[in-house]
Image (cartoon, rainbow, N blue to C red):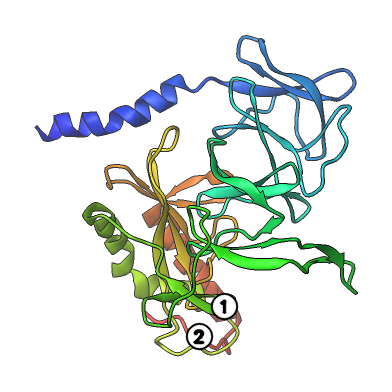
Amino acid sequence: MKKLLLFISLVPILSFSQQKEILKYFKSKDSLVGVKNQDGKIIVPAQFKIFSDLQDGEPVKGETIFFDGDRKGDQREKNAWGFVYDRKGNFLYRPFFYDNGADYFSEGVRRFVKNGKVGFVDRNGTVIIEAGHDFVSPFNYGYAVFCDGCDWEKTEDEHKAIVGGKWGVMNGKGETAEPVEKSVNTIEVEGQHFPDPFLYSEKEKNILQFFEKLNKKLSNIYYVNVYHKLSENEKRLFFEIVERPKANFPYYQINTYDYRKVEAGMMYDFKFLVSEDGKNIFALGEDDEKIPFEKWLKNEYVEAENYQREHPDNANKLNN
């Protein structure tokens, strides 16, 4: 019976790997970029001027097709960067422009722009929150800050800042969140307090328990290079499930947050994937590499030891 259950649990993963068509970027004679399948059929015509170091024949990774640049003949759209298509060649959305490129995924979603407004999509390109605000921050610990009637303004150091407008806080459904009285179960956002946004089933609590049992060791590793001295109460991490299994993604994603409830790694640091059956655990590396958890933990501990050896006066010592 156990063998049968194991086989059934692997079916979604096997089906996903077998059905995913191989797609590759190609360049035309005038250096415009498109996408073909393995049979040479054009999925998206060559019409994009790409700014990244993309090679002819490079495979498409992930659940969507991303073109990191402009489309021939188009005018640049405010706050937008690049184009995203599904794997059948249908246009999906334009990512929000952030940090000299397309917005990162944070807590399973990224910002997109439509008609000058900002909303959120998931990894499959499905709209999770409609584009309805002039600006929205990335999600952090279940909440995002938004404004209407605001705009970008250059600062003295040539960077831009959002100024003016009416500001608010939204939850993961895109609803305006109302502040509550401060308590041990509230989250602070922009000086106000909001209800803890994370609710879990018993299965999900068991998944998180794995990381809680290792909290002291993981916290020691993470905080070893934090410059200011932390109390033992501060020197701990929080683990939350920010994404659940869905089409093309048979995993729970667990993000890590520091003592301020701020995401521990912008791109991939201290982010984990747990298979739908809860048996396989990975740490996320660069380019979404899945690193077996035990291997990752061993490497991180060695790096933490090396850091402490090179910085003997570090404020937060690595304890066994």
Q: Secondary structure at mark 2?
A: loop
Q: In this orientation, which residue lies closer to the viewer: 316 or 8?
A: 8
Q: Left of 214 or right of it: where is 143?
A: right
Residue at 52%, 68% (x, y): give it: 303
Q: Nearer the viewer, residue 61 or 177?
A: 177
Residue 160, percent from left and from top? 83, 65
**In x, y percent, where is residue 260?**
51, 77
Query: Going 48% across and 52% down the picture, which residue do you hit?
Result: 173
Up the image or down, 220 lies above or below 257; here it is below
Residue type, mark 2 in image: Asn
Given the image, on which type of amino acid does mark 1 rest?
Answer: Asn
Q: Label 2: few (<14), some or many (≥20) within 10 Å?
A: many
Q: Earlier in the sequence, mark 2 or mark 1?
A: 1
Classify 26 as above or below 133: above
**x%, y% of residue 182?**
43, 83
Q: Quadrant of the C terminus?
A: bottom left
Q: Which residue is mark 1?
A: 225
Q: Which residue is mark 2?
A: 316
- Looking at the image, do the residues carrying marks 2 and 1 touch, with CB atoms under 8 Å apart? yes
